[in-house]
Amino acid sequence: MTKLLHRKKHLTSFQMIISGFALVILTGALILMLPISSKSGSITPFNEALFTSTSAVCVTGLVVLDTASYWSGFGQFIILLLIQIGGMGVITVGVLLALLSGKKISLMQRNTMQESIGAPKVGGIVRLTSFIIKATFLFELTGTLVMMPVFCKDFGIKGVWMSIFHSISAFCNAGFDLMGTVEAPFSSLTAYMGNPVINITIMLLIIIGGIGFYTWDDIRTNKYRWKRYRMQSKVIIATTLILLILPSIYFYCFESEGLSTGERIFSSLFQSVAPRTAGFNTVNLALFSGVGQCIVIILMLIGGSPGSTAGGMKTTTIAVLFANAIAVFRRKEDTHFFGRRIDENVIKNAATILMLYLFLFVSGALIISAVEKIPLGTCMFEAASAMGTAGLTLGITSGLGVISQITLMILMFFGRVGGLTLIYAAFSGVEKNLSRLPQEKITVG
C-alpha cells in the first residue's frame, strides 16, 4: 500500500484508490484460500475466497460461507484485518504506515488522501487523517470493552475475541459476525434482539462510523455550537436523524407484531440503523412485508455519509437532490442548505450518482434473477445490499452460482469505491474540452 502512494508519476489519485482496494482484495483472497484459513484445513475455492475478501474490504457483510463455522481463527483474523483496512480506507492505512516509518507525506499523497476521505480541501489533511486513525481505534476499543462482559458471560474467554470482532465490524459498517454455528449458520445477532447492551453499542458504533470522520472533526472542534458547524456536517446530521426516526416509526408500527415492548423498540431502531450499510440484523428480514423490505432496500441504497466507513449513494447525495427538487417546485434559481448556496456541479454529480446506482442496482438484480431463476424482488434486495455495501440478505447468498457471485462482487466494489471515483479513474487521461456547443431547449417532465 505504501508503494501505491509513491507511484505518483503513473497513477492519478482516483486510480491509486481503486488499485489499492483491488490489490488488498486479491491478496486477502489468496490468503483465505490457504488450508490454515479454514477450520477443516482444506483449500477454499478461489471464487468463494474472493467473494469473502471483496465483501470484507468493501465492508459489506454478504457471505457465501458462514464466518464463524467455516473459517478458522486465523481466517477470521484475516477477515477482520481486511474489514479494518476497508473501513478506514486503503489510502488511510497506507498513510498510517508511512507516518509510522517516519516518511514525509508529499503533495500528491495529500491529494489522494483528500479524495479518499472526501475532505473538501487539502489543507490540514494529514492532521485530519491522524484524527481518523486515533478516533477509529478509540471507538473500536470502547465498543469492545462495553460488549465484553456480555459476550464473556455467554462464550467464556472466547467472548474477548467476539467483542473485538463485532466492535470493529460494527464501526466499519461491515456486518460480519461470529454468531453462526454448523447447525444454524448465518444467524447474525438474532439471539441478542432484546439485549440493550449489544443493541445500543452496535447501533452507536454503526452510526458513529457512518456519519463520517469529517463530521466528527466538526463535532470535536465546535461541540454544541451548531451555528459554527460546516454546512456539510449540518446536512449529514439532519439527514441521518430523519433516516433513523421515520423508518423506526414504521417498523415499530407495522413490522414488529408479536414482540415484547422492549424487543419491539430495539428491533425497530436496529432495523432502521443496520440497513444503512451495516449488515447486522436481529430479526428475520424474510418475514418483513413487501413494504418493509422496500424501505430496507431504499435505506441500503442511500447508505452512510461521505468520508465514513459506510458505502451507498451517501446521505448528502439524497439531501442535495431533495433540496434541488424543492427549489424547482418553488421556482427558485438556487439550491441551498442552512443559508448556503449549493454549487451546480454538486447537483450534477448527485444526479449522476443516483442514475449510476439505479442502473447498476436494477441491472444486477435482473442478471441474478435471470441466471438463478429467483423472484426479481428477492434479487433486488440482494443487489441493493451489495450496491449499498449493506450485507443484509433474504437468505439466497450462499446458494448463488459463480455468475451471480461475480455480479455481486462488482456491485460491492462499485458501492465501496464510489461511482464517480471509478469514472474519473477511467477517463483521467481525457483532456477537458473547454469549447461549448450551441444551446437549445428541450422539454422534460
Image: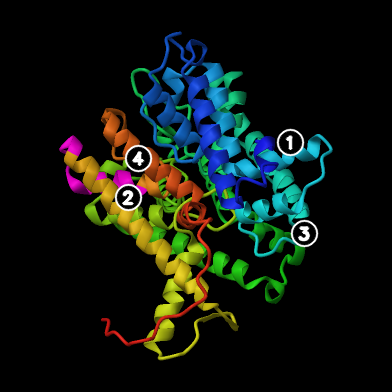
Where, by quadrant of the figure, is residue 121 drawn?
bottom right
| Mark 1 Cα-neighbour bin, 10 Å: few <14, some 14–19, many ≥20 | some
Specify the segment rendered in magenta.
Answer: 371-384
Q: Earlier in the sequence, mark 3 or mark 1?
A: 1
In the picture, the quarter occupied by the C terminus is bottom left
> Dot 4: what SS?
helix
Relative placement, left or right, of 143 versus 187 is right
Relative placement, left or right, of 37 versus 360 is right
Measured from the top left, where is residue 358 in percent x and y? 33, 58
Q: How is the image coloured?
A: rainbow
Q: Earlier in the sequence, mark 3 or mark 4?
A: 3
Residue in the image at 45% along x and 8% along y = 41
Question: Identity of the amino acid at label 4?
Answer: Leu
Mark 2 or 3: in front is: 3
- Give the residue pinned by disc 3: 124
Q: How many marks?
A: 4
Q: Earlier in the sequence, mark 1 or mark 2?
A: 1
> Dot 1: what SS?
helix
- Give the residue pinned by disc 2: 256
- Give the residue pinned by disc 4: 408
